[in-house]
Image (cartoon, grey):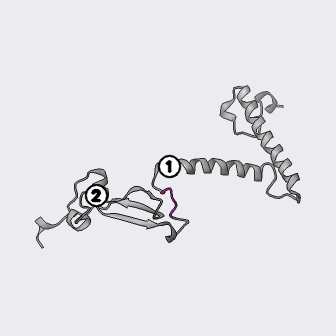
Amino acid sequence: MGEENRVEEKRMQMAFAGFEEDRKCLKYRCPAKAYGIKCGREQSCGGGKYSGYGRVVRIPLERDRRMFTPVARSSYKFKNLMKKRTAVERVNSRIDQVYGFERHFIRRKKKMQVRMGLALVVMLSMALGRIKQKEKEKLRSLVKPVLPMLQAA
């Protein structure tokens, strides 16, 4: 095989092409065709009936439900959902650790609902107080900073 016939291989991530509800699978297609990039392997990759569309790979969700979800991990929607999830996890962590719900001795559901409601009201009222005091940078802070004149005493 001569040097002139050799094709430089550059690996790229497959382009996400959507979730197929009827097949319950994620659809990925050839990145060269999806992004309009010139590729030297078109004949071996996407030849035949769908040559203008490129190679298509479908991954059924049932392969691994933890890894493959209807929202692809490479999509912008997934990144936005993860941002929201991490924000909720921060609130859950604060409830557990700061407000003492990690080690509790409450047995009744009604009593737990009341205590959780009170904890959330306290969190929101502290945030509201910070906004009214024009201290938005300290919005998530639970501890009031020590004033310099009290520090010297």
Label 2 environment density (alpha carbons within 10 Å; few <14, some 14–19, many ≥20) = some
Residue at the disc numbered 1: 77
Please state which of residues 147 and 46 is positioned toward the viewer in this rendering.
46
Describe residue 109's horizontal placement relative to residue 124 as left or right: right
Q: Can residue 71 be seen in this view?
A: yes
Q: In the image, residue 109 lies at what x, y percent?
A: 85, 56
Q: In the image, residue 58 lies at what x, y percent?
A: 40, 65
Residue at the disc numbered 2: 53
Describe residue 28's horizontal placement relative to residue 84 as left or right: left
Read off the magenta span.
68-72
Please state which of residues 117 and 145 is positioned toward the viewer in this rendering.
117
Q: Is residue 92 on the magenta stretch?
A: no
Residue occupying image coordinates x 72% and y 39%: 141
Q: In the image, residue 100 lies at what x, y percent?
A: 82, 52
Q: Quick one: SS at disc 1?
A: helix
Badge number at residue 89: none
